[in-house]
Image (cartoon, rainbow, N blue to C red):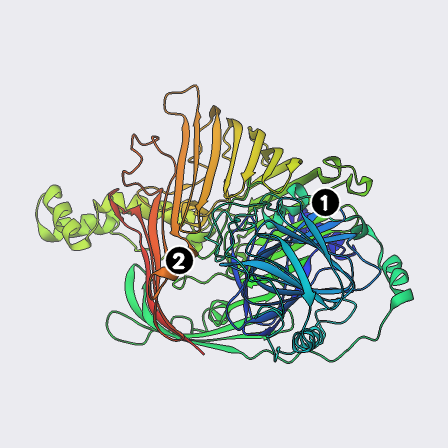
Amino acid sequence: MIRTAMVATAALLAFSLPVTAKNYPLSVQKGGAEIVRNGTGEQVLISDTATANADDMLSLSEGQQASLSIGKKTSLLIKGPAALSLAEQGNALTIALDDGQILLSRKQPYEFSTVTVSAKGFSFLPMGTVAAVKTLKDAQPTTAVIEGKMRMQTPSGEAMVIEKGNFGSVGSDGRLSTGPLSPRATESLREWLAQAPSAEGSTSEAVGPSSNDAALSAPPPAAAPEASSPEATDKPAGTPQKASPVIEQKTEPAAPAVPPAVKAADKAAAAPAADESAGKSPEAEKTAEKPTAQKVDKTPPPPSKPKWEISAGTATVNDEQWMRLALGVDIPIWKFGIFFDVELFIDNDGQFSDKGWNFKDDWLDALARKIRYIRFGQEGEPLFIKLGGLSSVSLGYGFLVDRFTNMLHYPDQRQLGFQFDLNDISPIGITLQTLVADFKDFDSDGGILAARLAFRPLKPTGIPIVKGIAVGGSYATDLNQYAPARMWKLKEPVSVKQLNYLHDQLQVDSATAIDTITRAWGGNDPRVDNEKYIDEQNATKADDPFGLIGADIGIPLIATSLVGLDLYGQAGLRDDGKHGWGIGAPGVSLKVWRLWANVEYRRVQGRFQPGYFGTYYLDERLIRDPSITTKEQRLVSDTLNGVFGRLGFNIADVLLIQGDYQYMVGKKETSTDQRFEALGSLGALLLDKIPKLNRAEIYYYKSRIGIEEDEFFEKTPFMYFGYRVGFEIAAGASLIWDARYGYEYDDNGDLKPNNNICVQTAITF
């Protein structure tokens, strides 16, 4: 009750606070867009509306169009192909434009005192209200001004002010020139401008596709010819840590303008503070808008069309490969997204299985299998809610909950998880993260719950570094580690009484009788089986909770375009009264362009493990064979000291490599906590060059290295490896191969495969 009350109280507190976090509403007018979330590397495909955060990377393909609200009365229109990101530095905003065409519209009062567009080393500083900038991979950037003025500056410092009704370009000699815009170019830009969101910057206003792309698609009249750029592209520094970004970029940044990558959920702890106006109350903001308030178009946006998916393939079910047929539909409604999934399984005997359709015996599981997810918003937005499958959820710096997922055995097992996030809200930057692994677990007298509450108490001071200091507290618990045993199917063994009876009937000695019955039984010695049966029977009734309490603090020491440096510390202890605690401090997180790394000293005393609720926790939670043990029982009681490190780098969008390693040793010879994880994937630039291939990655993970006198690559139940490959076989159709390999003990104590393989052809329309 106390744990539940803590989570509920935190949620009520968060709901009562005003949302004032800095974010950028995105609205798609034509085609779609893709956001690569900073820190997590999650790739989010957008077809309607969403929210982008500072340091996220946004890309549009040829023919796609979108608009971004970047402050009150300020809109940024984008035409694909395009690649860009945003960075905040106090009350200034920098738009790093790698490729594409944008149109900026600003009206007073300005929320950002300064907005700068950076492209290939050139800087564009709008001193008016409406101006466009275009840059191509093989040409210098250009600008066109409809209202106000634009200051254009070269990498060497040469500057020129472009007046209203004029263009600015770079000649073959590298010098700036200007001239009048043609009537056709002016008309085209004004048509494009008419599609901008309302002056209030709301994402709910209707917008339509552009009908004319002539404004900057050709050199303006009398412009000096554009030379191919010798300058490097202005590359955002926020490189994702878990997936390859899809934005094609050059090799060196001339003047990157994006702060270091941090986890979206920890933005309050590590990212630069929002501009000074972010802390204003809603009443103050309304007052500031009154002098220049304009008529707002309240027409709702056109409804997005549902997206259908038909798939057929094989999937691992009950350690067998079954055929799976599925029909899914993704229905977007405003910021909501609902994915309904109807599936049929054909077992090894060629019969249709009732898996997922047994409403009589397990209605909750049958219902849960019809919904892949229900969400509100996107991860990293001020409010994000998701029901269904959860992927890679971390709390804080991951000392208690580190990249947890409930989709280890999807689609064989579908768990009804819940994620609720409030990010950087109120004047003191409160962040709340909550997690429920599976509501169905409550029926088994169990449940995995976690929550983290953090805030930036000194944010209102506006003092550099100090305002970014964040402190947080976390709690994570498994209400009953034996909950999975409630679902075990027990095979009743031969009892001693039956054994004696058969011995008398067979008229043979006891050894022969036991041997005969053992062969018929198919197990071990029947007397041993009987003991195991009793242990398993007790496990199905057992109740053993386990919980952890944690705290963390983060201090952003450096937050520049090229380098980000954070100092942090974290700690955790058990809540069951037994001795066990650990610290991860000091810790240093470094981001240098396309390389990111962090290292921390760790000390553990008693039965404690950092990152206890990790990616593979649901497999490690309770092991059945050869003997029944919980993950808690397998913890070593000792004092351990060591280091944890993480390193990743993106090689020119060709290859993404990252890995984690922890090595801790104790006083006892058998006391170690050594784990290793590595991931490699092909980058977007290389995937674009390989016909039909749209995804390729491999991974390897192993923990408890050396505890059983095993080596790095020796088979154990704590080793997982696999790969994911995607092929485009036709327009709208893909072949997806997702294989994860592992091992577990059988009842004889021998290793057997514990694999999860899914091969399917998916057609979307």
The C terminus is located in which quarter? bottom left
Q: Is residue 634 above or below residue 110?
A: above
- Label 2 belongs to which residue? 409
Disc 1 packing (10 Å; few <14; some 14–19; many ≥20): many
For this rendering, which residue is in front, 133 or 474? 133
Position of 323 compared to 309: left or right? left
Disc 2 packing (10 Å; few <14; some 14–19; many ≥20): many
SS state under label 1: loop
For this rendering, which residue is in front, 222 or 388? 222
- Label 1 belongs to which residue? 273
Q: Do we see residue 326 in this rendering? A: no
Identify the residue at horizontal 44%, vertical 51% (top origin).
653
- Comparing marks 2 and 1, which lies closer to the viewer? 1
From this viewpoint, which residue is outermost toward the left?
508
Q: Amino acid at mark 2?
A: His
Q: Do we see residue 496 in this rendering? A: yes
Q: Amino acid at mark 1?
A: Ala
Horizontal and vertical percent position of residue 543? 51, 46
Snapshot quadrant of residue 563:
top right
> Do the residues under discs 2 and 1 have CB atoms within 8 angstroms?
no
Identify the residue at horizontal 30%, vertical 55% (top origin).
491
**Marker disc for residue 461:** none
SS state under label 2: loop
Horizontal and vertical percent position of residue 116? 69, 53
For this rendering, which residue is in front, 632 or 280? 280
For this rendering, which residue is in front, 621 or 426? 426
Q: Earlier in the sequence, mark 2 or mark 1?
A: 1
Spatial CA distance of label 2 from label 1 is 40 Å
Horizontal and vertical percent position of residue 210? 62, 77
Q: Is residue 233 above or below residue 131?
A: above
Query: How many numbered marks are there?
Result: 2
